[in-house]
Image (tube, grey):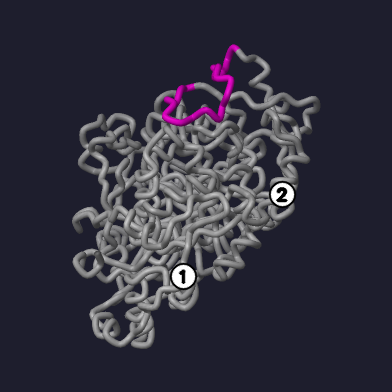
Amino acid sequence: MAVKGSSADNRTRSTVSLCIVIGMCCFFYILGAWQKSGFGKGDSIALEITKRTDCTILPNLSFDTHHSKKASSSDLVSSVKKIKPCPDRYTDYTPCQDQNRAMKFPRENMNYRERHCPPQKEKLHCLIPPPKGYVAPFPWPKSRDYVPFANCPYKSLTVEKAIQNWVQYEGNVFRFPGGGTQFPQGADKYIDQLASVIPIANGTVRTALDTGCGVASWGAYLLKRNVLAMSFAPRDSHEAQVQFALERGVPAVIGVLGTIKLPYPSRAFDMAHCSRCLIPWGANGGIYMMEVDRVLRPGGYWVLSGPPINWKVNYKGWQRTKKDLEAEQNKIEEIADLLCWEKVSEKGEMAIWRKRLNTESCPSRQDESSVQMCDSTNADDVWYKKMKPCVTPIPDVNDPSEVAGGAIKPFPSRLNAVPPRIANGLIPGVSSQAYQKDNKMWKKHVKAYSSVNKYLLTGRYRNIMDMNAGFGGFAAAIESPKSWVMNIVPTISKMSTLGAIYERGLIGIYHDWCEAFSTYPRTYDLIHASGLFTLYKNRCSMEDILLEMDRILRPEGAVIMRDDVDVLTKVNRLALGMKWNTRLVDHEDGPLVRQKVLYAVKQYWVGGNQTAAA
């Protein structure tokens, strides 16, 4: 089935492309009618439209505020450093998962597929080009099932996974039927099987982790059940699988269980899942199951489907010996017992375990000599930390029925309830009152944002990132089935708040913005950054951070930055040289507040036509 933009769409796109090149005169048009188009691309018609369209009348724009030095618009433009596009061969460049660099590292325990970032001297200082023919993704929920071929032009999965119903190529789109290796009849039916054992329907299970996610169909179909899955898979184990997931509008990152800890806090997920994810769960003393145990909430569920589950019945189809499969499942069962996971179901090729609520309900834990406990004082200190074959301690309880770390309300009640880590004083210096004040503040900020960017709350932006998430207030204020937010807690933040974000029923990840993020280019529709550049002042280059933002932002994507006026004035000059249209405005409380807000829209341009785009 071929899906094409209408000629009217193309004419609208072409007209707008002209206005973008001229600049700020069309800023609000870009935020409005241009972004509303949703599907289409710039083309040669723009050259003819350029001759007819008058976008040359520049309003008296000024980025001066009450606090800034007086400067004219012409002074601002003359100070802009123009950043050129990279060569077209970098269209899918992911710096910390670069294939050429990866091959220099050991293959043992998947080390070569982990993050390996380039040194400063090897970083690219150019704009990553979208592929020629790039179009805006379809709006959700259509995007779940269809992805434009031009955005991700790789057909290998349609061949490799043809009989498993992952993805099909149809004309100028890919179609995703919702199948998978373990669920050829569709993810919906597979999830129905899970829901017969796991309380998915009542909001008890809200956050999930999918290890080795493929194209993330499991996470895609959980979304309509109000479950938010963090999916990950290695780069190009099967070509472009994570890129497909994000093009579909499903949360995903490039990642692997290898030698370093997962970049998530302890006790984060209500459910973890592996469907033929090819992780050797019984190997290395059970280190990978121990890492899942660290990030799994007390009372949470672990699902394993595929080999070696129920091997006595299924071994013929797996082309492995009974002895090998029996030994593998026995080892998994042994480690599960050590972790105090209770098996609650085994049916067909699927087994489900549940983590105990606390150590009081775990008889084997009474004798600590039989268990190697981790000695780390901070189970959330994970950035580039090596995994060890030890069990992460969980908070003590006073009663066998008490949930270690505190009980959490079902979603959506938990979204604005005080997270247990705050209520129990586990985040130093943060009270319940301070948290509630933060929530109120972000509702106010978002209301102000939506008065400028009219499309913020409409679903126009599906994949959203908050680069300095705090307690997740921004994500909570815009929470909607129409969008999802990747909440980033920088590794240099004064407070480790990501655990509280998960307790709210939101998802996120730790990251250091002096390095590239673990995602493909053009995977986010909107990026929010509050106080980020002040946080990273004197730590790494402002230009490098902005270039990374541009790499992961889609053409026509939007940016909202909140920071000190002097910082944003510098950011604005760099942004204008990156093919961004910008507008700097005062804080919603008035011009006397030093904190300002910079709005930006990334212009539409593609590779293969860099002269016209420059």
Secondary element at image label 1: loop
In the displayed structure, 378 sits above or below 231; it is above
Residue 200, position in %: x, y? Answer: 64, 54
Residue 399, position in %: x, y? Answer: 80, 27
Question: Toward the viewer: 346 or 254?
Answer: 254
Residue 494, position in %: x, y? Answer: 57, 31
At horizontal 68% and vertical 28% (from top left) the residue drawn is 428
In the picture, residue 452 is in which quadrant? bottom right
Please give the range of residues in magenta: 369-389
Q: Report the amino acid beneath label 2.
A: Arg
Dot 1 alpha-carbon crowd within 10 angstroms: few under 14, some 14 to 19, many 20 or more: few
For the C terminus, which image quadrant? bottom left
Q: Which mark is residue 60?
A: 1
Q: Report the amino acid beneath label 1.
A: Asn
Q: Is residue 521 magenta?
A: no
Q: Is residue 386 magenta?
A: yes
Q: Among all residues in the image, which is located at the extreme front?
A: 70
Decide if residue 94 is in sight here.
yes
Question: Toward the viewer: 89 or 578?
Answer: 578
Question: Toward the viewer: 231 or 84?
Answer: 84
Q: Which residue is mark 2?
A: 414
Decide if residue 303 is in sight here.
no
